[in-house]
Image (cartoon, rainbow, N blue to C red):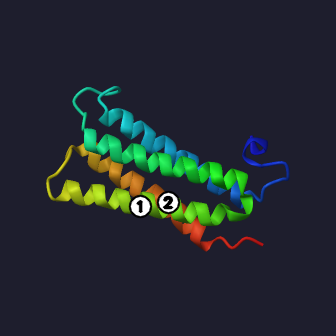
Amino acid sequence: MAELWAPARQAHPQIVVLRTWMLIEVAILGLASLVHSGQLVAGYAHPQARTAEAVIALVLVLALVSAWSHPERTRWFAVSAQGFALAGTLLGVAMIAIGVGPRTDADIVYHAVLLWVLVAGLAFAIRWRPA
């Protein structure tokens, strides 16, 4: 599987971790976007949340593709995209707090988990210093 994530030359193990972590973030956001589209679970449709999650997932995908094609800039792409994702998620949490958007227990748990995943990934990317 590491070959999939590494270009012609072998990628540093931390690059593989960052790419994999970002892929997990894309999956979480993509799944949430599908839920908020009403396609996976009835009763959770919310067009604004769907769009926001899809845009954040797209930014992460673009960063992931860029990191794959430019491994020397993986850290920069990871920090930038995850920072954007964290800011967007915090905006979503603020909207929930003021009563805009879905306010179900599932949505609150989802945002808590997503915040943890984004903060952990961002912290890893910021602390990593490539050789």
Q: CA distance from mark 1 to mark 2?
A: 6 Å
What residue is rendered at 38% in x and 46% in y?
53
Q: Is residue 124 above or below residue 59?
A: below
Label 1 secondary element: helix
Tell whether 125 sits left or right of 33.
right
Tell whether 15 sits left or right of 11.
left
At label 1, counting other C-alpha atoms closer than 10 Å, the crowd grade (few under 14, some 14-19, many 20 or more) is: many
Question: In the rendered image, which residue does mark 2 sit on?
Answer: 82
What residue is rendered at 55% in x and 47% in y?
61
Tell me where residue 7 appears, x and y as whole percent.
Answer: 79, 49
Q: Which quadrant of the figure contains the C terminus?
A: bottom right
Three-letter code for the amino acid on which mark 1 is drawn: Leu
Question: In the rendered image, which residue does mark 1 sit on?
Answer: 86
Q: Which quadrant of the figure contains the N terminus?
A: top right
Three-letter code for the amino acid on which mark 2 is drawn: Gln
Confirm or deny contact between disc 1 and disc 2 (CB under 8 A): yes
Tell me where residue 101 appears, x and y as whole percent.
Answer: 20, 47
At label 2, counting other C-alpha atoms closer than 10 Å, the crowd grade (few under 14, some 14-19, many 20 or more) is: many
